[in-house]
Image: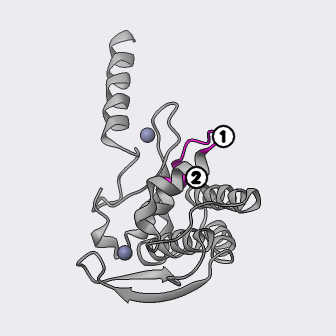
Amino acid sequence: MDYDDYGSNAVELAIDLANADRTDSWVPEFLTAHDEWFTDGTALELSARQARAVAETADLVREVALAESQDEVVARLNALLAMAAPKPYATDHDGELHLHYAAAEAGALEQLTTTVAMGLSQVVVQHGWQRLGVCAAEGCGNVYVDTSRNASRRYCSNTCASRSSVAAYRARQRS
Ligand SMILES: [Zn+2]
Ligand SMILES: [Zn+2]
């Protein structure tokens, strides 16, 4: 998925976090799999308390996507932003000029919560809260950002979209 139009790749991190499978060791696994979001040399080991804050952040992202009114979105977004400690700076470390939201020397948890909160907030504020949704495919429940021109997306992925149209086709055949 290409979020370039959204001016914030950071929303990808928020979506991945909300959709992470919560096995026993999911927090260290998630951080390691997303280490490109952290300043080089950031220690990715978290305490149990910090790992709970990661789970809480993931819950809040999902709650923002599930919100059904702008008032709900604002309240949930602000709860998420309260966990952030923004200290933005511009960088071209990967060859393209972009913003990082957390201080380079911040700990892993602070970098994560700040990047997630700022990335998600930017998309909601610039493009509207209706752009966030939860996949309509049976048994999926993944959160997504709708980057389609007419905001018509209902599924997290092409896989879920085609799985659902096949299911709908079979249901029509049966009836
Ligand atoms: Zn970067
Ligand atoms: Zn899905």
Three-letter code for the amino acid on which mark 1 is drawn: Asp
Q: CA distance from mark 1 to mark 2?
A: 10 Å
| Residue at the image point whose x is 54% and y is 82% from the top | 105
The rendered magenta stretch, by its main secondary structure, is classed as loop
Q: Secondary structure at mark 1?
A: loop
162 lies left or right of 110: left
Q: For the C terminus, give its image quadrant.
A: top left
How far across and down, in percent of the image, does residue 170 sit? 34, 16
Measuring from the top left, give residue 10's x and y in whole percent.
43, 69
Residue 134 lies, in percent from the top left, at 51, 48
List x then y, in percent, for residue 15: 48, 57
Residue to which mark 1 is pinned: 24
Report the span colored magenta. 16-25
Seen as rendered, the residue at the extreme top is 174
Q: Please tell me whether mark 2 sits on a helix, a strand or a loop.
A: helix
Q: Amino acid at mark 2?
A: Pro
Quarter that holds the N terminus: bottom left
- At 35% from the left and 43% from the top, the residue drawn is 157
For the residue carrying disc 2, how many other residues have a C-alpha within 10 Å: few (<14), some (14-19), or many (20+)? Answer: some
Judge the density around disc 1: few (<14), some (14-19), many (≥20) Cα neighbours within 10 Å: few
Q: Quarter for ligand 1? A: bottom left
Residue 149, quarter of picture: bottom left
Answer above or below: position of 102 versus 53.
below
Magenta stretch: includes residue 24: yes
> Is residue 19 inside the magenta stretch?
yes
Residue that sits furthest to the right in the current view: 49
The front one of 171 and 87 is: 87
Q: Which residue is mark 2?
A: 28
Q: Considering only vertical position in the picture, is 142 above or below 126? A: above
Q: Are marks 1 and 2 in contact (CB under 8 Å)?
A: no
- In the depicted structure, whether residue 165 falls above or below residue 94: above
Q: Describe residue 113's horizontal placement relative to residue 142 as left or right.
A: right
